[in-house]
Amino acid sequence: MYKWLIGLVLLVFTATAQAAVNVVATTPAMGMLAETVGGDAVSVRVLAPADRDAHYLQARPSMMAALRGADLVVAVGAELEVGWLPAAIRGANNPSIFPGRTGYFEAAAQVDLIGVGGPADRALGDVHPAGNPHVNMDPVRMAEVAHALAERLIRFDSANAEQFRANAEAFERKVEERLPAWRERVADVPGVVFFHEDADYLAKRLDVPVLGYVEPLPGIPPTARHLRDLVRDLEGREGVVIRATFHQERGPRFVAEQLDWPVYALPLDPEVGASADDYLDLMGQWVDAMAGKL
């Protein structure tokens, strides 16, 4: 009798564990969104740590192993992961997560992108003709993605449809609650120089002028000539310089020192396992940095 009960408990536990949708997210921000929308009905594994540039990872056996058992891949898209995710998916030998299948989801495909239609010429740097892929830096677009992700999860687990949709709604409300204070924080700020075009979405959302970039072209390291030209063009103006933590420090520091501006370094993604509030707190830090008050 005792053994029979133990067996029954194990059977129920196994069935419950198997009920969770197995999600593999490419970045911590995408992992946050999957966990926020999916709740207890999903298990999420993240491939890229927060301190790495998701442009330049390499497909690894550990990624392929994670993808081999995935029901759903949640990627940023717009070619952000083009250098490694396609190879990792091929190596995983899991056709259900190939692009175009129900098991493949791109955030960038769910929203309007900025920077669409540029030339597909690598001589012009790390260009993205499909549009700027850094949609995770716009919480409003992330809320749109949350709703689309809820509908995708329903294809795997229709029993939790109501909960997925409610979770997406709750995330959108959290974003809307923070927007007024963020807009007030950066009202009339003079502008910002970014290292890369990664925070353009947030600046555009909050009407913060982008005065330039430390990179001469996307993905191209700054040259001495470009930095001197940037300083000359901005002399006499006010602003701040902001880089992602994985970007080199020297170029941004030079520009900031020459212009006597503050310079900040911030992560683009929250830590793996972050909550929606953690993600929005990070966006709040970017807002404070753009205001020069971090």
Image: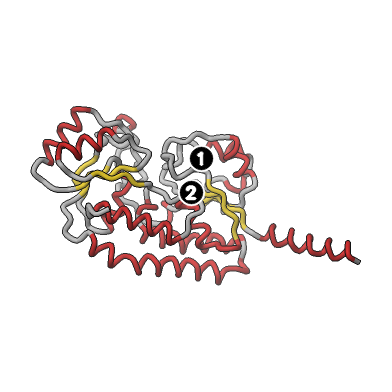
Q: Residues within 10 Å of mark 1 (few under 14, many from 20)?
A: many
Q: Which mark is residue 75?
A: 2
The answer to whether 247 is drawn above or below residue 153 in the figure is above
Residue 5: x, y in percent?
85, 66
In front here: 185 or 159?
Answer: 185
* Horizontal arrangement in the rendering, residue 230 relative to residue 152 (left or right): left
Q: Residue at coordinates 50% horizontally, 34% vertically from top-left? A: 58
Do the CB atoms of the residues marked 1 and 2 lie less than 8 Å apart? yes
Q: CA distance from mark 1 to mark 2?
A: 9 Å
Q: Which mark is residue 85?
A: 1
Q: Residue furthest top?
A: 224
In front here: 48 or 22?
Answer: 48
The answer to whether 169 is drawn above or below residue 17 in the figure is below
Q: Is residue 178 visible?
A: yes
Q: Residue at coordinates 59% horizontally, 59% vertically from top-left? A: 42
Q: Which mark is residue 30?
A: none
Residue 49: x, y in percent?
48, 43
The answer to whether 95 is drawn above or below residue 186 in the figure is above
* Horizontal arrangement in the rendering, residue 87 relative to residue 185 (left or right): right
* Horizontal arrangement in the rendering, residue 13 relative to residue 211 (left or right): right
Circle 2: residue type? Ala
Reading the chain from its start, which is encountered first: label 1 or label 2? 2
